[in-house]
Structures are given as structure tokens and as C-alpha cells.
Image: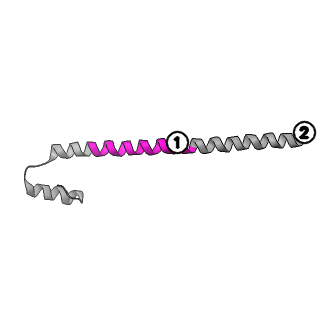
Amino acid sequence: MTGKIFFKLIGAVLGLLVVALVAVDFFASKVAESTYLETLERELIDKGKMLAIALPSNPIQFKQYAAAARGRLT
């Protein structure tokens, strides 16, 4: 009789641990994703500021920058 109670108690504790681990994993994933996106946005802003400072007024140099960046500067 007491053996069944302990198995139920152990099962309940393990179930609670599983639920807690899933919840922590879910929320930690959201925090990691938002931090990653904020980092990418900050890096993009910084690169844009550096590009704005370094931009030449000569259109030929624009094409050189675009070729070096493997992109398109408009």
C-alpha cells in the first residue's frame, strides 16, 4: 500500500520537473532570440553610421563600395 503512494509521489515530482524544464526552455529561447535580434539591429545601425561617415561624393567610388560589399548601394 505505501509503495503505491511513493510511486505516485515520485511520478508527480518528475511530471512537475518536466513541465518546469519545458517552460524554462521556452522562455529562455524567447530571451535568446530577442537578444540576438537586438544585437543584429545594433550592428546594422553601427555599420550604417560608419558607412555614412565614409561615403564619398564621387559616383564611381559608390560602385567600388558596392562591389567591395557584394551588394547594392542606393
Range of the magenta residues?
A: 25-45
Quadrant of the image for the N terminus?
top right
Given residues 67 and 37, the one toward you in this image is: 37
Residue at x 7% of width, y 53% of height: 58
In the image, is 57 to the left or to the right of 48? left
Residue type, numbered disc 1: Ala
Given residues 50 and 9, the one toward you in this image is: 9
Q: Which mark is residue 28?
A: 1
Q: Which mark is residue 40?
A: none
Is 35 colored magenta in this rendering? yes
- Relative to 46, does residue 72 appear above or below in the rendering? below
x and y percent of residue 65 in the render?
17, 55
Q: CA distance from mark 2 to mark 1?
A: 39 Å
- Displayed quadrant of residue 8: top right
Residue at x 9% of width, y 58% of height: 60
x and y percent of residue 67 in the render?
19, 60
Q: Which mark is residue 2?
A: 2
x and y percent of residue 25 in the render?
57, 44
First in sequence: mark 2 or mark 1? 2
